[in-house]
Amino acid sequence: MGRAARPLADRPHAAHNRMILRRHPAPARRPAMYRRLPPALTLNQAMDGAPALSRLAHLADQSTAMYGCVQGLIPPALRPLVRPGPLDAQDWCLMVSHSAAAAKLRQLVPLLRSRLQQEGWDVQTLRVKIMGGR
């Protein structure tokens, strides 16, 4: 009825199969599906560890403070359309949502720049740019 299993040595090609197994090691284990990640950093910890990021945050804070200084000079209907933009050494940019608001704000640039200089901000150039959000 049932055949008795032959020993491995008596099977045809047994020696060949053993050689193949010796030449080709078992594949490497797959990486764990859920690797343990390092704990997340807070924004303050990341800024402390990266001087460039710290400088960028400082410039963003300065830009926001400068906008707070001139916000009272911008007409109330125009304020929601204006955002503080990038700040360079002596150049500052205000971002607006569309060209009509940019045209009106450009008329106010001399007034805004003089207010900033009165408050102690060293701004030589104040640019107005249109945001590209669609």
Image: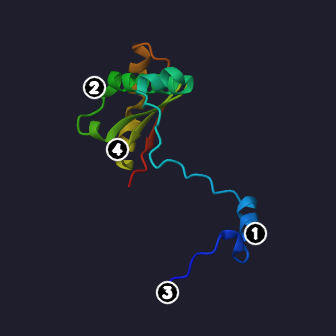
Query: Along the polypeptide, which appears first: circle 3 or circle 1?
Result: 3
Q: CA distance from mark 3 to mark 2?
A: 101 Å
The residue that mark 2 highlights is: 72
Whole-percent x, y for residue 109 in the image: 42, 31
* Mark found first going from the N terminus, 4 or 2: 2
> Is disc 1 in contact with disc 2, using a CB cutoff of under 8 Å?
no
Which tag is nearer the camera, tag 1 or tag 2? 1
Q: Taking 22 as reference, is 113 left or right?
A: left
Where's residue 36, x and y in %?
46, 38
Considering the numbered disc 4 on the image, is that residue within a helix, a strand or a loop? helix
Residue at the spot 39% in from the left edge and 51% down from the top edge: 133
- Residue at the limit of the structure toward the left, as seen here: 76
Alpha carbon separation for disc pair 4 and 1: 85 Å
Which mark is drawn over residue 101?
Answer: 4
Circle 4: is it few (<14), some (14-19), or many (20+) Cα within 10 Å?
A: some
Looking at marks 1 and 2 on the same chain, the residue that comes earlier in the sequence is marked by: 1
Between the residue at mark 3 and the residue at mark 1, the CA separation in whole angstroms equals: 28 Å
Amino acid type of the residue that numbered disc 4 sits on in the rendered structure:
Ala
Viewer-nearest of labels 3 and 2?
3
Q: Is 64 above or below relative to 130?
A: above
Q: CA distance from mark 4 to mark 2?
A: 16 Å
Residue ID for mark 3:
1
Q: Residue at x 43, y 30 (%)?
A: 39
Return the disc, 4 or 1, that comes first in the chain's sequence: 1
Q: Secondary structure at mark 2?
A: helix
Q: Are marks 4 and 2 in contact (CB under 8 Å)?
A: no
- Looking at the image, tell me whether mark 4 or mark 3 is earlier in sequence order: 3
Q: Please state which amino acid type lies under the numbered disc 2.
A: Gly
Residue type, label 1: Ala
Label 1, on which residue? 15
In the foreground, 14 or 122: 14
